Amino acid sequence: FQAEDGIRDTSVTGVQTCALPIFINWGKSDSPNFTVNAWRNQVRSVQIACNKIYTLQACKRDNVPHVEFSTDRRVAANWLTSGECKIVYCRTTVRGYGGVGIVLARKPEELVSAPLYTKGIKKDREFRIHVMGGEVIFQQEKKMMAKGRRPERFNAHVRNHANGWVFADQNLVIPGQVIDVARRCVVSCGLDFGAVDVLWNDKLGAFILEVNTAIGLQPKLAAIYAAKIKEKYLGNKL
């Protein structure tokens, strides 16, 4: 729920009050101009989650497996020259989603100026795990589109719809470590709920990539979130 979904006290100017028992913060990273009795996803936690550097730092602090990262271009160059990885993701924005702002570098001279660099890991699988109140409420895996539907610009390294990838949620067998690191990532960021993107390598295991707090909801997922919010936070009163 955003502020508009609550009941405002229109007799008061400036700071306004919200009559809902709690405020479900859907990706809002700045403080509202009204008072709230109780939050789910505090603003500070969303600020951590929506910044990839802060998210990865939180995971590093709490020993949650994550993609290796650096803010130093020289470190990224050394990954490539030393053979530690074959590809570096230059993330020219730390608040992008859907692959926005990613430049791939396979040689040091291909690196571009960016606030964040992440070391490429062989992706055998990639998941989005939806966690609320410590419970996994939904699971998805990125799958290649059928060959006839794939775009000419199909890309195995940046997995989004434009590059030929879709989310699947049927008949998934998900490694237990993926579930574990997703739960831990939500806790490390201080969130009540989030959709965690996790990479899986058959030899190395699971690695956190990022966590989403303004989750895009198609009808099936929207119904699941609505039901779980009512169950966990509103006592099924709505």
Image (tube, rainbow, N blue to C red):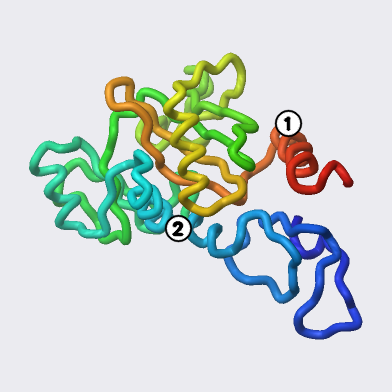
Say what amino acid the circle numbered 1 marks: Lys
Taking the image as shown, residue 23 lies to the left or right of residue 183, namely: right
Viewer-side residue, 161 vs 48: 48
Badge 2 crowding class, 10 Å Cα cut-off, few under 14, some 14 to 19, many 20 or more, is some
Say if 170 sits above or below 20 in the image.
Answer: above
Residue at (35%, 34%) from the top-left corner? 157
Q: Which residue is tagged 2?
A: 51
Residue 136 percent across, percent down from the top left: 60, 32
Say what amino acid the circle numbered 2 marks: Asn
Q: Earlier in the sequence, mark 1 or mark 2?
A: 2
Tag 1 and tag 2, C-beta contact below 8 Å:
no
Viewer-side residue, 45 vs 33: 45
Residue at (54%, 47%) from the top-left corner? 212
Taking the image as shown, residue 59 lies to the left or right of residue 143, namely: left
Quarter where residue 17 is shown? bottom right
Q: Secondary structure at mark 2?
A: loop
Q: Secondary structure at mark 1?
A: helix
Badge 1 crowding class, 10 Å Cα cut-off, few under 14, some 14 to 19, many 20 or more, is few
Q: Which residue is tagged 1?
A: 220
Viewer-side residue, 133 vs 195: 133
Residue at (56%, 51%) from the top-left corner? 191
In this view, the residue farthest toward the bottom is: 13
Quarter where residue 153 is shown? top left
As measured in the structure, the alpha-carbon distance from the residue carrying label 1 to the one carrying label 2 is: 27 Å
Viewer-side residue, 202 vs 92: 202
Taking the image as shown, residue 237 lies to the left or right of residue 29, namely: right
Residue 108 percent across, percent down from the top left: 14, 49
